[in-house]
Each structure stands twice: as structure tokens, then as C-alpha cells.
Amino acid sequence: MNALTIDSSREGGEWYAGVINDNGLIGGNVIDDGNDTVDYCYPYYWPTENNDPIALEMPEIYPYGKIYGINANGQMGGGCSTMRIRITLLFSIAPMGWLT
């Protein structure tokens, strides 16, 4: 296992590689503090484990983007939203029985 290179402009963020295909194309993201109340998530991909990451630009209205899957042809699928905190709240309140 080798460490992937990261974008030095977001060196302080939490980096994740979430998907990889048989050709070695890797998709992931970095969670980077945007301000005091919202974290922003930026999707990246690495053509191979030896390449620098390439940022996928998110629209300003949807700053939270994540890659969820990749196929053999290198097409990636993902999602975006306005805030990470919404996703975090859904996961944190579900075990308490608030969501049924």
C-alpha cells in the first residue's frame, strides 16, 4: 500500500480515497473546514496511485461533493449538497430512534 499524494492547498483537510477501478483510477475527497459552522467536501481523482490528485470543481451553490462509485470505463458517479452537516445529522440522530 502506498500513500497517495495530496493537494498542498488543502493539506490540513481529511483525505479519503473511496473508489478504485481495475485500471487503477482512484476517486476520493477531502473534507476541509470552510468556516466555523460548515465543512466543505471537495471531490478529487488520481489517474493512478503515482499521480497528483486532480480536483473536480463543484458549483458554488453545492460546495459539498463526494464520489460514490466508478465503473471499468472510468466514469464516476457521486452526489452534492449544500452542507455536510445535513448528512451528519441524519446519521447521528437515526440511532436514537428519531427516524423510523
Image (cartoon, grey):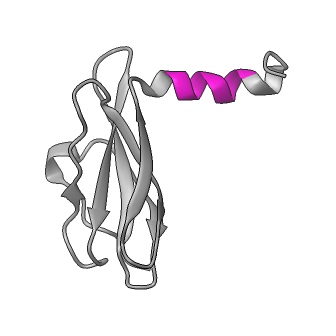
Q: Residue at x 38, y 77 (%)?
A: 73
Query: Quarter holding the N terminus?
Result: bottom left
Q: Given the current orientation, which residue lies at the most extreme bottom position?
A: 23
User: Mostly what secondary structure, the magenta segment?
Assistant: helix
Residue nearer the viewer, 24 or 7? 24
Q: Is residue 90 magenta?
A: yes
Q: Nearer the viewer, residue 24 or 61?
A: 61
Residue 58 placement (x, y as % from top left): 25, 39
Q: Is the residue 14 above or below the residue 17 in the image?
A: above
| Horizontal side of residue 49 vs 16, given as left or right | left
Q: Residue at x 57, y 27 (%)?
A: 88
Asked if 64 appears above or below 35 in the picture, the reply is: below
Position of residue 31 measured from the top left corner of the image (x, y, whole percent): 37, 40
The span shown in magenta is: 86-93
How far across and how far down the image is residue 27, in percent?
38, 62
> Residue at image x 19%, y 54%?
7
Residue at the (55%, 28%) spot, across then down: 87
Left or right of 94? Residue 53 is left
Q: Is residue 69 above or below residue 11?
A: below
75 vs 26, nearest the viewer: 75
Give the position of the C terminus as an image quadrant. top right
Would you say residue 27 sits in the magenta stretch? no
Q: Quadrant of residue 91?
A: top right
Numbered disc total = 0
